[in-house]
Image (tube, rainbow, N blue to C red):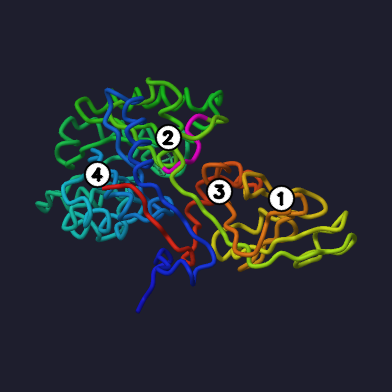
Amino acid sequence: MEQSASTPVENPITAGNRLTIDLSALARNWQAMARIAAGAETAAAVKGNGYGIGLEPAVAALAATGCRTFFVALPAEGLRARAVATDATVYVLNGLARDQAPGLAAGNLRPVIGSTEELADWATYRAQGGTGRAALHVDTGMNRLGLTFAEARELAADPEAAERLGLSLVMSHLACADTPAHPLSARQLATMRDVKALFPGLAVSLANTAGIALDPAYHFDLVRPGIGLYGGPFIAGRPPLETVVTAEARIIQVRDVPAGETVGYGAAATTRRPSRIAILSTGYADGYHRAASSTDQRPGAEVVLHGRRAPLFGRVSMDLAAIDVTDLPQAARGDWVELFGPNMPVAEVAEAAGTISYEFLTSLGGRYHRRYVGGA
Ligand SMILES: *Cc1c(COP(=O)(O)O)cnc(C)c1O
């Protein structure tokens, strides 16, 4: 049988690590965002397999708490979301592939039109009687997807354009919202106001999670949070809303390593004292990134067990990672160790690995035993 990367490992005994995914916390995080963005509609980004937690459970829990609009990257993700939330509006952020307009519309998915080529395809489809709806993406400074402002102005010169194309939303995306003082955000906001003026009557959307936190001026008609819903950072530098994902690995064994020995691949970390090293059943094949390793040159990530922190020791390998438990004599074979969760923010682990929470969450591998708690 074909297995997707997110196929849950059903048996907690045969899995070496486990994920606990709190769908009630996800719903409460969405409600918190909706309160902060009161006056705007609060949608949800569920791309990347629901930021790693599972697209279907995420959509089901969010829809049950009142979310009516979802953003995915790909049509295939859109169909999965649609199957769970039959009445929701589902936007496909990566836009319109050639000849895909009828297929998207048949799946009741709305492409986010992001270039003049896509726009031309969509216009042809609509001119031939297609009734599907779409969003228009206008670039305001990220230079990734979206019509340029000049292209949008040209389109808007025809006052019937939005109607003719079946547009239900005009949106843009912030490049630097997680750096609150960054001047690009204010420039993007000013451009977005000009975009709004081009398309009177059309709903406007600009803010992702960090954009919601910036200022209500960024909220417009619809906000599109992702990472903050899943327990990643909400306000830069502050604790997350509620933790949604707890990732744990089991200690396979604890070994004594004399001073002056090295641990793991590359002999990258040297014991400075007689040490107790615990070997964890997790590795980069589980999405615990190798960049979280510690070496003699730089510290790595930390984990939590018995209410205390312990540092990684040496390189993370494919299926294993080592931690220094010399100062934690209770550590024993079979213990569960928190990789990230309520006691260890995913943002902190990601930072120790030189990356961001998004990458840690979306890389969560298929070997975890997944346990969903709460939810509808
Ligand atoms: C992923 C994404 C979002 C959600 O962003 P977060 O930073 O996770 O809140 C919103 N809009 C677009 C266009 C996106 O690609």
Q: Which residue is mark 1?
A: 311
Q: Earlier in the sequence, mark 4 or mark 2?
A: 4
Label 2 vs label 3, nearer the camera: 3
Secondary element under disc 3, as helix, strand or loop, is strand
Judge by depth and name the residue closer to the eye, 104 or 37: 37
**Mark 2 vs 3, N-terminal side:** 2
- Percent across and percent down for residue 168 are 21, 38
Task: Pick out the residue farthest to the right.
Answer: 260
Residue type, numbered disc 1:
Pro
The reply to whether the C-beta atoms of the residues labelled 4 and 2 are less than 8 Å apart is no
Q: CA distance from mark 4 to mark 2?
A: 18 Å
Q: Name the spot of residue 117 as percent of width and height, x first.
A: 32, 50
Q: Secondary structure at mark 1?
A: strand
Some atom of ligand 1 lies within 8 Å of the CB belonging to the residue at label 2 = yes
Q: CA distance from mark 1 to mark 3?
A: 13 Å
Spatial separation of the CA atoms under disc 2 and disc 3: 20 Å
Instruction: Give the amino acid at mark 4.
Output: Ala
Ligand 1 has an atom within 8 Å of the beta carbon of the residue at disc 1 = no
Quarter of the image that includes the N terminus: bottom left
Q: Earlier in the sequence, mark 1 or mark 2?
A: 2
Along the horizontal axis of the image, is 313 left or right of 97?
A: right
- Distance between the Cα atoms at labels 3 and 4? 26 Å
Kindly identify which numbered label has been placed on residue 209. 2
**Which label was assigned to residue 63?**
4
Q: What amino acid does circle 2 point to?
A: Thr
Picture quarter containing residue 102? Answer: bottom left
Q: Mark 3 and 4 residues: CB-CB less than 8 Å, in contact?
A: no
Pick whichever, 244 or 355, lies toward us.
244
